[in-house]
Structure formats: structure tokens, C-alpha cells
Image: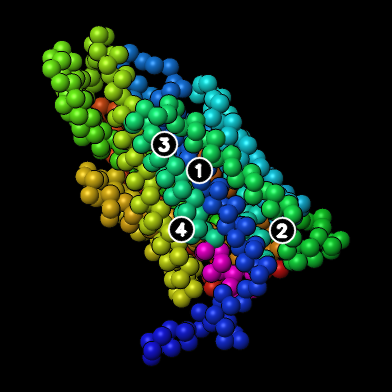
Amino acid sequence: MHGMEEFRSDPNDLTPNGKAWWQELNRYHWFVLVVAALGWLFDCLDQQLFILARPAAMRELLPKLDDPAAFEQSIKIYGNYATSIFLAGWALGGVVFGMLGDRWGRAKTMMITILLYSAFTGLSALSTGFWDFAFYRFLTGLGVGGEFAVGVALVAEVMPARARPRCLSVLQALSALGNMSAAFINLGLGVAEEHGLVSSPWRIMFLIGAVPALLAVVIRRRLKEPEQWQQARRDDVITKQLGSYTELFRTPIWRKHALLGLVLACSGVIGLWAVGFFTPDLMRRVQRKGVAQQVYSERIARAGSDTTLIENLKTLSELENQKSPKVPEELLALKKEVDPAINGRLSKWGSYTSLVINIGAFFGMFGFGWLSERIGRKPTFAMAFVAAFLSTASVFWFLRDFTQLFWLVPLMGFCQLSLFAGYAMYFPELFPTRLRSTGTSFCYNVGRFVAAIGPIIQAELIKLFAEQEESLRYAGVVMSVVFLMGLLVLPFLPETKGKPLPE
């Protein structure tokens, strides 16, 4: 009991009137937090559906090549290109809708962005080739990029001051549930594909991604604009400056926060999208030979006395162990019959990887919020950047056995994604009400124009290391250094722990 009393007396956990921070929230506060969390949760669901569906989509949409090794290389490279195009849309959406969030209002802009990313996620399922798929992903990115800034601005302005950082860390932590939901969807469809119940499961995944549009109805009916924003909107002098990039860069202090915040965000965003989100691909590659051998062994066992079929299956099984297998033309039909079972099981491994990453991420984002309230935002960021670099490089260098999936990968998720709780808490604390959505979006989303180059650089590194069997590993280790970039700007940014939002 003594320990509990000591914990509850911690000034970081109690508001000035002696209540715990969550006791300060009324019913409307909780409603706003739930709606904003669901908006970001579904946003992350869409992102993760794309990450998990990307290999299968590329496999179906790209022209087939006679050389299997060259085709696999093409899948990786064009998957990176699709990711870069998606991130470019995300960045543009962030710039536009971040500004509109200050001008039109948080609730209205959130509704529009959710409708946008839901509609074009669904349309991605109708793609017939790489370029229309990439176009739909670009338009989806517009909505995804706009949602985050207005969501965190809304929560930051509605919540009581003491509860604000905790609510923002909860908002970001719950995004892991969106990623985990995508993993469960991919897992279920992978099982269905393995048993021949569905074809093109990636298309079904994108159709499911259209469901969040229903949330827009709730937002339209019940969500109100924050009083802080309404007051700024009524002020005739300030109205002209709402959501103004000119105003953001004309004032030295806001310009400094925007530019340094941009670098801070680039470090985590590039690291996640150019490295971290390729971990499911790495796990599929690690498991490819073992899964293929298992499937062929099962098929051989079921072949009975059909010696010709057994020999053909053994030949295909042996080809899986070769670096650049040349499948005889007479065995192509049999390989096409077996491949769905292999791909279905590999999809499950991709799902398992995504799940454990986001289990780690869930605790990492809560951990960032807890630690930053005790030692400050900047020291917590510094620790998180170093931890993200070390854990990510370790995964891409050492991950070679499925048992490592259950400790090495969630540790990486804990370290990498904790940074994003920091962004959700920190960026709204850097800008005044009239520029909060604009400034937050600039930091978090304009960085994605730079981040969009990350997957392209990784694609070039894969080409550079093409002669190496472990090209994805080498590219991942090299790219993980980007996490250290955030350390360069931390000394020049303000510490905002315990300070009110600027007005």
C-alpha cells in the first residue's frame, strides 16, 4: 500500500486539484479521444494493409518475366516505387489538409480526409496494373497525410492541460491496434488462400480498407470544433493568418520550430517506411525455403504411388534451394498449382511479423509518453533515436530464425514506433492555435517528401547488392543509420514538458 500511495502522489500523475489525469475528462472529452483515435487507427489500418498486400499486389500486377530471380527482384523494386508514390501523396495531403484544418476547422477536415483515404483504398482493389495501383495509392496518401495533423490538433486543444500529453500518447498507442487489425486480416486471408478458398486476397484487403468511411458519419453528426479554434476564427485580425504558411515562416520562432521539427520527423518517418516496414518482407524471405520444403513434402506424401508426380515435386523442391532457379517449362503448371499454398503460408509469417512489431509498438508509445512526462521530451527523443537505430540494424543483420521473431522484432517495434508518440505529443506544443494544424502537418508530413526518397534509395541499394543473396539485409542495415539524424537537431529545439500550449 505504501508503494501505491507513493506512486499516486507523483505530480506527473496528478492534476493540481489532486485528481488523476483521466478523472479530469468528461464525457465529451472521451468522445473526442475515441473519435480521433479511431480516425488514426483506421488510417494506420490502411497503411499496414498496403505494407502487407504490397508483395502479392506487385506479383499479380507486374508483367511476368522468364527469369524467376529477375521477377522477384522486380517485385521488390516496384514495391519500393509504389511506397514512394504513396508517401509523396501523404506529404502533399499533409501540406494541403494541415492548412485547411486551421482554416476550415478540425472536425470538418478530419471527415473529408477519412472519406478520401477510405474511398481510394477501396478503389485500389480494382487495379489492373502497376501505374493505376500507384495512382490510387497516391490519392489514398492525400487523405492519410491530412488526418494525423487535424486529429492531434483536435485532441491537444480539447483536452485539459494536464491530460493533454497522456491523451496524445494514448491516441498514438491505439494506432498499433489498427496495424494489428491489418495483420489479422492478412493472416485470415493467408489461411484462406492456402486452402484455395480465395484468389487475389490482397484485393479483398483493400476493399475492407474502405469501411472506415462510416466513421465520417459520426464525426459529421456529433463532433464540434474546439473552443480555442473557434475563438481564433472569430478574431478578425487572426482570421487572415489561420492556416497560413506565410505566417508560419514569417515569424522566426515558428519558422525555427517548423524546420527543426521537420528534420526530427524525417528521421523516424524515413526509418520506418524505408526500413522498418520491410521487416515482414525480410521474414518472408527468411522463411521461404523452409515453408516451400514443408509444402512440397506434404504434397509428396499425398501423391501416393504416382511416381511421376513425386519426381516432379522433388525437382521443384530442389529448385527452391537454388539462387536463380530455372523452372522447366513442363513443370510450370505444377509450380503454379503449389505456389498459392506457399504464398499463403508466407503471408501468415508476414502477419506474425506485423503483429509482434505492433505489440512492441503499443508498449513503446505508452512508454514514450510516460518517460517524457518524467525526464522531458528531448532526453526521451534522444534515447529513442539511438534505440531505434540499434534495434533496427540488429533485426536486419541477425534475423535468421523464426524464434527471433518473438523478441528481436517486438523490441524493434517498441523502439521505432515510440518516436511517433513523441511526434504526436511534441509537435502541437510547438505552434500557436492559428498555426497548430499547419505547423504539425508541416513537420510530420512534409518530411514525407524527403521520406519518399527513402524507399527509392533502398531500391537502388538492393540493385547495388543484387549479386548478394542478402541484398535486403545490407540495404536495411545501411538505411537504419537515418534514425541518428534526429539527434542533430534536438539541441536546438525547446523543451515543452509542463508548459502550456503557445497562443
Residue named by callout 4: 419
- Magenta stretch: includes residue 445: no
Amino acid at pointer 4: Leu
Q: Earlier in the sequence, mark 1 or mark 2?
A: 1
**Which label's residue is closer to the chain start, 3 or 2?**
3
Mark with earlier residue (3, 4):
3
Q: Does label 4 or label 1 sit earlier along the sequence?
A: 1
In space, the residues marked 3 and 1 are separated at their CA atoms by 17 Å
Marks 1 and 2 sit apart, C-alpha to C-alpha, by: 25 Å
* Residue mark closest to the camera, 4 vs 1: 1
Residue under the image location 46 percent in, 71 percent down? 370
* Residue appearing at x 53%, y 21% in the figure: 128
Inspect the image, locate mark 2, and give the three-letter code of the amino acid beneath it.
Leu
Q: Dot 1 lies on which element?
A: helix
Q: Nearer the viewer, residue 32 or 408?
A: 32
**Residue 261 placement: quadrant:** bottom right
Residue extent of the magenta highlight: 159-170
The N terminus: image quadrant: bottom left
Magenta stretch: includes residue 168: yes
Q: Is residue 160 visible?
A: yes
Question: Distance from label 3 to label 4 (Cα)?
Answer: 31 Å
Please name which of the two marks, 3 or 2, marks the residue nearer to the observer. Answer: 3
Q: Tell me the residue that label 3 is attached to.
A: 189
x and y percent of residue 279 in the render? 35, 43
Task: Determine the residue positioned at 84% across, 63% down.
Answer: 235
Q: Is 326 on the left or on the right of 111, as rendered?
A: left
**Which comes sooner in the sequence, label 3 or label 1?**
1
